[in-house]
Image: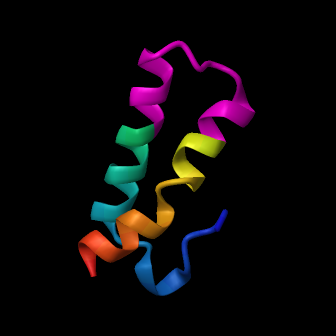
Amino acid sequence: MTRVPVEYTTATVKVYLAECILRAAAEGHTNYNELFTAAADQIQSAISLFT
């Protein structure tokens, strides 16, 4: 899944995905594709955690 469904775009989900991106960046993943993948891999987890 590469997009968060509109009904789940809450501030909490956005913050969770931002944290995933920041963690990936801290681990040295700095190009767009790596950061995008880090967030995309966590979308389903974010939706299940916060809904």
Q: Position of residue 20 (x, y in %)?
A: 41, 40
Please name whichever residue, 37 or 13, is drawn nearer the observer in this view of the structure. 37
Q: Which color scheme did the rendering employ for the protein?
A: rainbow
Residue at the spot x=39%, y=57% of the render? 14
Residue 30 lies left or right of residue 7; in this view the side is: right
Residue at the spot x=39%, y=64% of the render? 45
When the figure is inspected, residue 39 is found, relative to residue 29, above or below; the finding is: below
Q: How many marks?
A: 0
- The quadrant in which the C terminus is found is bottom left
Q: Quadrant of residue 23?
A: top left
Residue 33 lies left or right of residue 7; in this view the side is: right
When the figure is inspected, residue 32 is found, relative to residue 37, above or below; the finding is: above
Please name whichever residue, 15 or 35, is drawn nearer the observer in this view of the structure. 35
Please name whichever residue, 9 or 1, is drawn nearer the observer in this view of the structure. 1
Residue at the spot x=47%, y=55% of the render? 42
7 is within the stretch colored magenta? no
Residue at the spot x=46%, y=16% of the render? 27
**Residue that protrudes farthest toward the bottom in the picture:** 7
Q: Which residues are magenta?
A: 21-36
**Residue that protrudes farthest toward the top in the picture:** 28
Q: Position of residue 11 (x, y in %)?
A: 32, 63
Tell me the chief SS of the magenta region. helix
Q: Position of residue 1 (x, y in %)?
A: 64, 68
23 is within the stretch colored magenta? yes
